[in-house]
């Protein structure tokens, strides 16, 4: 039995080249100047929007349960967990961005 050696996989080989990251579509076409900044900003904007959306879902689930419009308390618990995960993700994104910035500032030119 012959085992093929591991080959370097080029972008576009073996997977779909139109992946979505944070709502922005990545294509194999040459990126325009400044698209890195917009992709970076889009990731943070989407994370912030997720926090807002999940908080609204949580408030709506609490309201419906408190007013008796629903009788299943698990939807509130699920909405609470989603909201907490969205906040945790945003905090981790912020921490990684600050760590990256601090690392770049430590570089001596």
Image (cartoon, rainbow, N blue to C red):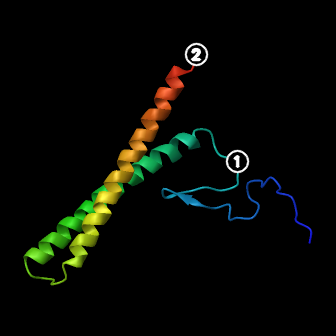
Task: Point out the residue furthest to the top here.
Answer: 109
Task: Report crowding for label 1: few under 14, some 14 to 19, many 20 or more residues within 10 A (C-alpha).
Answer: few
Residue named by callout 2: 108
Residue named by callout 1: 30
Quadrant where the image shows the N terminus: bottom right
Q: Vertical placement of 68 versus 84: above or below?
A: below
Q: Residue at x 45, y 40 (%)?
A: 96
Task: Point out the residue furthest to the right here.
Answer: 2
Q: Along the horizontal axis of the image, is 62 left or right of 15?
A: left
Residue 86: quarter of image: bottom left
Q: Residue at x 14, y 76 (%)?
A: 64
Q: Residue at x 32, y 64 (%)?
A: 82
Which mark is first along the chain, 1 or 2?
Answer: 1
Q: Vertical placement of 57 versus 30: above or below?
A: below
Task: Point out the residue furthest to the front here.
Answer: 1
The picture places residue 87, in percent across and down from the top left corner, at 31, 53
For this rendering, which residue is in front, 46 or 92?
92
The picture places residue 27, in percent across and down from the top left corner, at 65, 56
Looking at the rendered structure, the secondary structure element under dot 2 is loop
The picture places residue 68, in percent across and down from the top left corner, at 9, 82
Task: Report crowding for label 2: few under 14, some 14 to 19, many 20 or more residues within 10 A (C-alpha).
Answer: few
The picture places residue 19, in percent across and down from the top left corner, at 60, 61
Looking at the rendered structure, the secondary structure element under dot 1 is loop
Residue 79: quarter of image: bottom left
Q: Vertical placement of 51 versus 38: above or below?
A: below
For this rendering, which residue is in front, 35 or 75?
75
Q: Residue at x 61, y 15 (%)?
A: 109
């Amino acid at each position: 039995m012959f085992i093929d050696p591991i080959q370097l996989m080029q972008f576009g080989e073996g997977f779909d080249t139109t992946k979505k990251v944070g709502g922005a579509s990545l294509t194999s076409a040459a990126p325009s100047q400044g698209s890195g900044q917009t992709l970076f900003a889009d990731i943070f904007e989407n994370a912030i929007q997720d926090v807002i959306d999940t908080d609204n879902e949580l408030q709506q689930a609490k309201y419906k349960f408190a007013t008796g419009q629903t009788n299943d308390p698990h939807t509130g618990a699920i909405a609470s967990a989603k909201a907490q995960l969205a906040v945790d993700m945003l905090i981790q994104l912020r921490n990684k961005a600050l760590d990256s910035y601090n690392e770049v500032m430590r570089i001596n030119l």
